[in-house]
C-alpha cells in the first residue's frame, strides 16, 4: 500500500491500526519488523504532508496580505 495518494487521515488510521497490532504480546518478530517499517514510511509521509500544508497555508496568508481588503477596494479607484 503506497502513501502517495492517501489522505493524512487515512494514513493516521493505518498507523493507529499498526500500533494496536504491535501492542499485542504475541506478535511474530518478522511481522513486527514489517509493521515498524510500514509505520516509519507512514510517519515520514504524514510529516511531509503536514509540512506541505503548512507551506501552502503560509503562501495563502502571505498572498492575502499583499492584496487589498474588499473594504479598501473603493479607496484604490
Image (cartoon, rainbow, N blue to C red):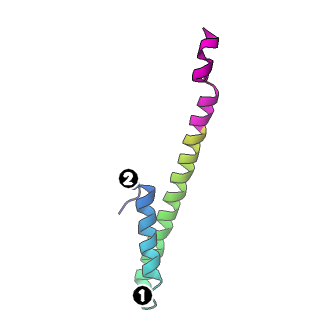
Residue 68 on image: x %, y %: 61, 21
Which residue is the site of mark 1? 27
Q: Is residue 71 above or below residue 31?
A: above
Mark 1 falls on what kind of element? loop
Q: Residue furthest left?
A: 1
Between 72 and 8, the residue placed more toward the observer is 72
Which residue is the site of mark 2? 5
- Residue sitting at x 42%, y 80%: 21
Residue 4 on image: x %, y %: 40, 53
| Cα–Cα span, label 1 and label 2 | 29 Å
Residue 6 on image: x %, y %: 39, 56
Q: Which residues are magenta?
A: 59-77
Mark sitting on residue 8: none
Determine whether label 1 and label 2 are within 8 Å by CB.
no
Q: Is residue 21 above or below residue 50?
A: below
Q: Residues within 10 Å of mark 1 (few under 14, many from 20)?
A: few
Mark 2 falls on what kind of element? loop
- Residue sitting at x 53%, y 47%: 53
Residue 64 on image: x %, y %: 59, 30
Q: Residues within 10 Å of mark 2 (few under 14, many from 20)?
A: few
Between 76 and 49, the residue placed more toward the observer is 76
Q: Residue furthest top?
A: 77
Q: Quadrant of the C terminus?
A: top right
Residue 58 relative to residue 42: left or right: right
Question: Does the segment drawn in magenta span residue 61?
Answer: yes
Q: Quadrant of residue 27?
A: bottom left
Q: Residue furthest bottom?
A: 26
Q: Earlier in the sequence, mark 1 or mark 2?
A: 2
Q: Quadrant of the N terminus?
A: bottom left
- Residue sitting at x 43%, y 74%: 18
Amino acid at each position: 500500500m503506497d502513501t502517495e495518494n492517501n489522505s493524512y487521515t487515512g494514513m493516521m488510521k493505518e498507523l493507529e491500526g499498526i500500533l494496536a497490532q504491535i501492542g499485542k504480546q504475541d506478535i511474530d518478530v518478522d511481522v513486527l519488523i514489517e509493521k515498524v517499517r510500514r509505520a516509519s514510511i507512514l510517519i515520514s509521509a504524514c510529516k511531509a504532508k503536514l509540512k506541505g500544508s503548512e507551506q501552502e497555508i503560509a503562501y495563502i496568508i502571505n498572498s492575502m496580505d499583499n492584496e487589498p481588503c474588499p473594504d479598501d477596494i473603493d479607496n484604490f479607484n
